[in-house]
Amino acid sequence: MIKHSVYKEEIEGATILYQGLPDLRRLYVEVTNRCNAGCIMCVRRTWNEAEGYLTYDLFQALIEEVPCFPLLKWLYFGGFGEPLLHPRLLDMIRCARKKGLKIKISSNGQYLSAIAQDLVQLGVEEIIVSCDSASEKSFKAIRGGSLGQLEEGIRALNRAKKKYESIHPRLVLEFVAMKCNVNELKNLPGLASRWGAFALLVTNVMPYSADTMGEILYTYPAASKIPKAHGLMPGNYVDIASIVWEAAAKKWFTWGTIKLPRMVWGAARNCRFVNSYSAVVTWDGEVVPCYPLSHSYSCFVFGRRKEVKRYSFGNLKASSLYSLWTSEEYVRFRGKVRLFRFPSCVDCELAYTCDYPVENCDCWGNEPSCADCLWAQDIIQCP
């Protein structure tokens, strides 16, 4: 019998035991942080990070560890770059499929037509494409790409699925809701129907610059009561649910699904990454707990500037994924996040006079802190 490490913690009169189990179930791999789009809301507009590609040798070494994780079933290609730019993406998919992993890809879809047939033949389960408008003019203004080129790629994908009599990859459309495009949302169910999409995922914008701070549609209950020294005072939230469901009832098929974000900060907090037993590997080999902590950048949470620093448990160039996943630091971190032992900084009375959140830490001594994480609120959603 294999013995796993056990880590003990005493807190508030209770004893918590954390086991370093190989219970990883989902693996997110950022094969590059480069991108061919120019999205107005992207973090890439504000950072000065070096760019590059995950090496194929490092990826192969990572996939060789799959047998160490008996519950690992899914591999997601995504992150803060465009995976279709990687020159060996198809080889990576083949490598992962040989180990029995199911594949999802998150993409802007601009290069989809070139590899659509390969994705079908390789048995990719799902592809999520970004589509923030149903009109060419608005799409180009937001994404810097071409809606027509995206549609061409989706048609190529559908032709390949028909040719090989496959329902995979399932197509999901992802829409980033902002003030400048929320009225376009009513056109997305019709577009999804025409393209044969399996689902529509709607998420809110995460402002990475002062220019996009005014684009948010979400709020928090005590916004009018909490004094603040600077930043944005959010108003009433936009009821995007009524917009999209009314359109879906008229335009979409009965088996299509729509996943909507929360629009108001509330008590329930749940990390989708930690609670789904997921890990993220960045293009340079760092193992991090989630997308929000995968890079260093500035952002704005309800108008307050926040400096986020990458939180890594180690690099695959020096350590195995197994050793990092079962390490004391990573195991304790996941335990803390599952119990969500963080204050709620957004609706604290000192929210805009306290300096802790600016450096992504909190008054409970956590660094990094998930105290004002919009992902944990499902205000921001990832595929």
Image (cartoon, rainbow, N blue to C red):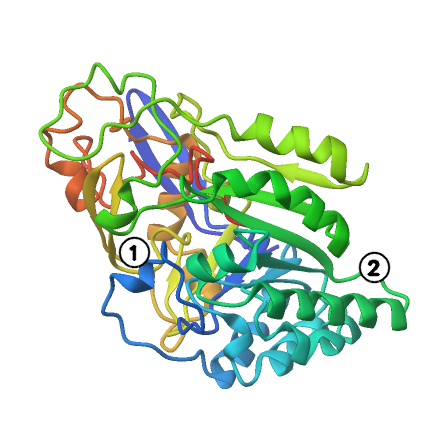
Looking at the rendered structure, the secondary structure element under dot 2 is loop
Residue 246 or residue 130, whichever sits in front: 246
Along the horizontal axis of the image, is 315 left or right of 173?
Answer: left
- The reply to whether callout 2 and callout 1 are in contact (CB within 8 Å) is no
The CA distance from mark 2 to mark 1 is 38 Å
- Tell me the amino acid under the disc marked 1: Tyr
- In the orientation shown, which residue stands out farthest toward the top? 225
- Which comes before the other along the chain, label 2 or label 1? 2
Q: Who is closer to the viewer here, 230 or 48?
A: 230
The residue nearer to you, when weighing 1 against 118, is: 118
Residue at 32% x, 58% y: name it: 43
From the top left corner, tell me how far across and down residue 316 is, in percent.
41, 73
| Percent position of residue 359, x then y | 16, 45
Q: Which mark is residue 311?
A: 1
Residue at point 41%, 54% (across, down): 291
Kindly identify which numbered label has been placed on residue 171: none
Q: Disc 2 marks which residue?
A: 167
Disc 2 marks which amino acid? Answer: Ile
Circle 1 SS class: loop
Q: Nearer the viewer, mark 2 or mark 1?
A: 2
- Circle count: 2
Q: Residue at x 70, y 72 (%)?
A: 97
Say whether residue 271 is left or right of residue 110.
left
Position of residue 74 measured from the top left corner of the image (x, y, whole percent): 64, 58
Q: Is residue 215 left or right of residue 201?
A: left
Local packing at callout 1 (Cα closer than 10 Å; few below 14, some 14-19, many 20+) is some
- Res 237 seen here: yes
**Residue 94 visible to the viewer:** no
Please state the horizontal and vertical placement of residue 121, each as a whole percent of the image.
79, 75
Say few, some or many: other residues with alpha carbon within 10 Å of mark 2 (under 14 / 14 to 19 / 20 or more).
Answer: some
Above or below, 151 relative to 15 = below
